[in-house]
Amino acid sequence: MTPLKKTILYLTLFSIAMGFMESAVVIYLRELYYPGGFKFPLVPIPPHIALIEFLREAATLIMLVTIGILSGKNTTQRFCFFLFCFAVWDIFYYVFLKIFLDWPESLLTPDILFLIPVPWVGPDIAPCIASCTMILLTLMVVYHHEKNIPVSINRKEWMLLIIGTLVMITSFTRDYFNYISQNNRSAWSPGVENKLFAEFLDYIPLTFNWSIFLTGELILLSAIFFLGKRSVIAGKQSRQQVIS
């Protein structure tokens, strides 16, 4: 097994373990706040617990970014390894929730996906699709590096990745902003005395804007396509130089 493949193996094990830890925390929270089973509308959470939850999510991101930086040899590898760990962690988070709680009931079950900087709401399959896209990007980069083909993300591809991500995040946060604006509620932030989700007193998500999400997904896939195409061309040129 090559060093790069070993790195992917260890990152996978690390991320699966993180997915279990994340699901364990959520299981504890649901025992406390949703003893009858998780459902909308959300139960308000005391400010001090909400702040801890914010910090826990921030710590999770720091851990994923750090392991990506430590594992990668260049900017592209570090970025992709971060995405890979994030993706595997997210997928196995749902796998372990299904094992221990038999939840979600279906891939379209709505969930609170993230809290930073505001609540993200969407069906469980949506973040799983995004995670598969992250894994695809990483495996493509690893494949070309294994073939000794240098891979680096150029400016156009970075822009597509950033825009696609922002569009996708919009699909998750759009419902929240619509709800608080239509009901004259203010967004919750750490440090306030109000309870987290107090602005969600009667909020039950009924629809998800798949058109926005899929637009973001297509933009991300286009970035991966352009990166892959450049890498293939670079590989052909490298082989031609060796032959000549």
Image (tube, helix red, strand yellow):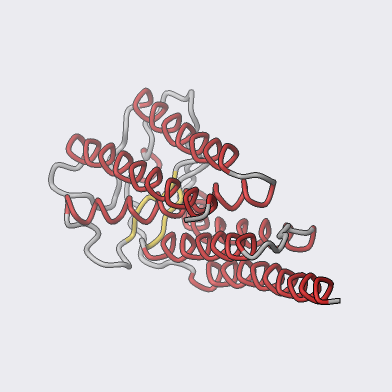
Measured along the vertical axis of the image, is residue 61 above or below residue 47?
below
Indicate left or right for 14 with 100 as reference: right
Image point (33%, 53%), residue name:
92
Q: Nearer the viewer, residue 105 or 82?
A: 82
Image point (52%, 38%), residue name:
67
Q: Residue furthest left?
A: 36
Spot occupied by residue 84 in the image (x, y as percentages of width and height): 50, 53
Q: Residue furthest front?
A: 243
Spot occupied by residue 198 in the image (x, y as percentages of width and height): 36, 38
Indicate left or right for 215 with 232 as reference: left
Image point (65%, 44%), residue name:
73
Indicate left or right for 237 with 94 as reference: right
Question: Tag count in the figure?
Answer: 0
Q: Nearer the viewer, residue 162 or 177?
A: 162
> Where does the C terminus fall, quadrant-wise?
bottom right
Measured along the vertical axis of the image, is residue 152 above or below residue 200?
below
Image point (71%, 60%), residue name:
151
